Image: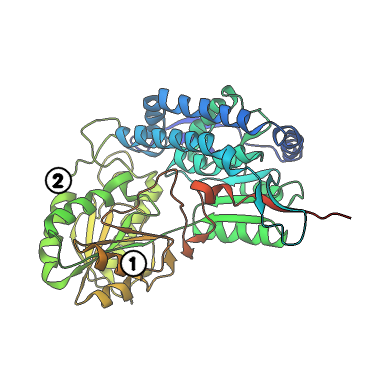
Amino acid sequence: MATYRTTNPTTGRTETDFPTLDDGQVEHILSRSDAAFSTWRTTPAQQRAAALTRVADAYEARAEELGRLIATEMGKPLDQGIGEAQLAGSIYRWYATHGPDLLESEQLDPQGARESLVQTEPIGPLVGVMPWNYPYYQVARFVAPNLMAGNTIVLKHAEICAASSEVMARMLHDAGVPEDAYINVFAGHEQIAAMIADPRVRGVSLTGSERAGSAVAGTAGEHLKKAVLELGGSDPLIVLDDVDVEHVAGIVAKARLSNAGQACNSPKRMFVPREMTETFLETVIATFEQATVGDPLDEDVDVGPLSSVEARDGVVEQVARAVEQGATLHTGGVALSGEGAFMRPAVLTGVTREMDAYWEEIFGPVAVIHSVSSVDEAVELADDVDFGLSGSVWGRDLDRAQQVADRLEVGMAYVNEHGTTLPGLPFGGVKRSGFGRELARWGMGEFVNVRLRRTSAL
């Protein structure tokens, strides 16, 4: 059975335990969500949009409070947590603004009939399984478009995000979303599997690990349910030979340290021209060593703890195994003494295909730097792994950089930025990074019935 509790990763101390869902309540939850669908789907789109606008207002007004909450849950530095809350609010506002238009019916060429009309309709109750690394943003990506579309939602958050998930539910309900249209549950994996299998549930969205994605996709497939999966990533970052290498290295090093490196689309593997590698490496090392690691509520801290001691120890073990297998560790990679889930940010070179670190996602503050002899080699190595979430190319010649970016086997390719996420941009990956898209109009299109209504005269 899942255990929902807040264990502060700064102190390692458990602060709150939360009661979990009883097996006998699963049927009641599904009945509530199914009954609410018949009402919520017929609520005018502008009324649903007005509720989302009030949700957006609440995120903006309570951003600091929300940032402090997740600092104690999963260790995000306060300024980053505030920024995440504001981003979540902007997602609700985007769908409140654009959602009604996206749901409008579209007239097609009649093609021999009196009318050929495409309608966009909700499909029913959905289950969302969300991760801990971006507690507000990940939920908003799934919830905003689907509430706007008229679906109802049963939301299972990560076990360490129980407190923030309760706050999000209250914010939605206070804004006018019916309590049964959005139900927050502290459910276990078997209970979620039972919900997905139930015929009243019409789809599932999961952001999480490959293992979790495989389990959810298997259950969804067995019962012919639509699924959207956003899984792991080992994002490549390619540096071209016409850049100011110190400037670029400084930018990408800070990007890798954001959220203590706990982001699926963080730039984890960096490919640098051989003649630039020494300077690039020195700059990244210096940036990592100068970063202040500590209490996420301290405004001077750059890198907070990892989400848990177990997560920290797992990353430290990955670094140690890479060194055992022949990689070179230039700095960091060790747990800090004392309480909490802190580690020194690490820089690795010499990682080869024979090593586990070449293939694994390292979900922590670890940069892996590869020296390459050509752009072709960089692209070949970038595309060599099983992940395909996002990647970036950095160069002054934009035409050339775009051509290189077009060769990356990813769902999101960036030039001179990495991992940018905005409400109006699609988000998602290929290969083992998952399938389906979130955000923008594509996020509205995953869990709807695109229905044709064709009318001919008798």
Quarter of the image where the C terminus is located: bottom right
Residue at x 77%, y 50% (from the top left corner): 199
- Inspect this view and state whether residue 343 appears: no
Mark 2 is surrounded, within 10 Å at the Cα level, by few (under 14), some (14 to 19) or many (20 or more) other residues, namely few
Position of residue 33 relative to residue 249, above or below, is above
Percent position (x, y) of residue 216? 61, 56
Residue to which mark 1 is pinned: 357
Of label 1 and label 2, which has the lower sequence position? 2
Instruction: Determine the residue positioned at 32% across, 37% down.
Output: 80
Residue at mark 1 to residue at mark 2: CA–CA distance: 25 Å
Residue 74 placement (x, y as % from top left): 40, 39
Tell me the kind of residue under disc 2. Gln
- Amino acid identity at mark 1: Ala
At a point 43% along the width and 49% down the height, the residue shown is: 425
For mark 1, give the secondary structure.
helix
| Res. 181 image quadrant | top right
Q: Quadrant of residue 241?
A: bottom left
- Answer with the quarter of the image where residue 153 lies: top right
Residue 449 to residue 162: above or below: below
Residue 290 numbered tag: 2
